[in-house]
Amino acid sequence: MPSTLHQPFVRRLAGSQVPAVGLGMMGMSEFYGAHDDAESLATLHAAFDMGLRHLDSADTYGAGHNEQLLGRFLAELSPAQRAEISFATKFGIDRPPGTYERHIDNSPAYIRAACEASLKRLGLEQIGLYYLHRRDPSVPIEDAMTALAGLRAEGKIAAIGLSEVSLQTLQRAHAVHPVAALQSEYSLWERGAELEMLPATAAMGIAFVAYSPLGRALLSAALPATQDLAPDDFRRILPRFNGAAGEHNRALVAEFAKLADTWGLPASQLALAWILNKQAHVLVIPGTRRRTHLASNWAAGQIRLTTEQLTALDALFAPGSVTGERYTEGGWVGIESPRG
Ligand SMILES: NC(=O)c1ccc[n+]([C@@H]2O[C@H](COP(=O)([O-])OP(=O)(O)OC[C@H]3O[C@@H](n4cnc5c(N)ncnc54)[C@H](OP(=O)(O)O)[C@@H]3O)[C@@H](O)[C@H]2O)c1
């Protein structure tokens, strides 16, 4: 039975009401093959024109390139338009440009310097939502939060977020200063957050921002074979996309694509709609570099699924159905979420 379209889902994020479908900008700078700034900017403008109001960046994406792109886009808007956008950036991953090796730093001095550098690249006086991207266990979270609260008091950031932290860290942080958003990987093929973090953030009134909601494109059922991806494509090294695990997961996604087809939906839209229909406080930030995918992802915010459809998807992607870890050994550095 085809699903019907409704008003877009709307969520609360850092004091604003925004459509639940946002835009992840990471691929506009690196990780998923070649990028094209002209098409990226056209995609950002198209996103604004269709009503999308939540953009996600980080200082580490393209070693500052992503924030510069975001700053360029925001500068092309009028002040009134700019004020409508909830944009986020992140700090904490110190990475030599072009490499995946990472040093995590949450020290107060680093946080201040990173914030100043991001503001400069963005060309702005204030960052909307500022996330601690990864945890540095040598710095108590209370110290990092105190530094962030100081930046907020000075007006350099408007709200504080945390990414990929444990529930205990989130609770300790929230006791120092309210946390506006928690960002972690969440999708049909990464459901670890359902154990603790999704119910806890709902209870604490913290927005949950689901990253890689399309399983880094695998859930679109349109991703070329891993060996055919660009030589520098990050998915070439991720366990879930490779070897026997990759084959197993692609077979699972083929079953998913059949269901989507039966229901008259593109697999990518069904993957996003599953998240939005299940969790009332979750926002999605599907990443795309191009307008065609943007329009399709945006439309997912209007799809209402039935209980039967949700149950069928839950069963297909039941715990244990996906094989392989979601990160390499190096990629787990600074991640406190349960490993899987
Ligand atoms: N906090 C963190 O640690 C963290 C980690 C990773 C990502 N993130 C954030 O989350 C955002 C989203 O995650 P992600 O980009 O890793 O993964 P994703 O959104 O699950 O997937 C992105 C991939 O899917 C493709 N795609 C997008 N829409 C599509 C569609 N409708 N049909 C087919 N393919 C489609 C994109 O290619 P095209 O560009 O060709 O469309 C890209 O290769 C990032 O951009 C970033 O802002 C945060």
Image (tube, rainbow, N blue to C red):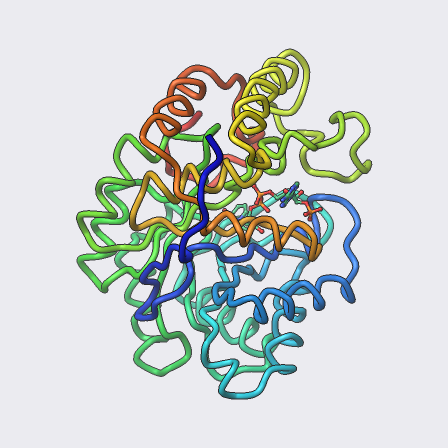
Q: Position of residue 151 (x, y in %)?
A: 36, 75
Please identify the quarter of the rendering in which residue 249 is found: top right
Among the 4 quarters of the image, the one containing residue 166: top left
- Residue furthest to the front in view is 1
- Look at the image and tell me in which quarter the C terminus lies: top left
Towards the viewer: 316 or 82: 316
Q: Which residue shows up at 52% across the image and 82% down it? A: 81
Give the residue displayed 50% in from the left and 36% down from the top. Answer: 271
* Vertical arrangement, residue 112 with respect to residue 62, above or below: below
Query: In this orientation, which residue lies closer to the viewer: 182 or 294?
Result: 294
Closest to the observer, 141 or 163: 163
Name, please, the residue furthest toward the bottom. 79
Number of residue marks: 0
Measured as percent of width and height from the top left, residue 145 is found at 30, 62
In percent of width and height, residue 31 lies at 69, 45
Identify which residue, 239 or 299, lies in the foreground.
299
Q: Is residue 181 left or right of residue 210?
A: left
Q: Quadrant of residue 101?
A: top right
Question: Which residue shows up at 63% across the image and 56% down it?
Answer: 61
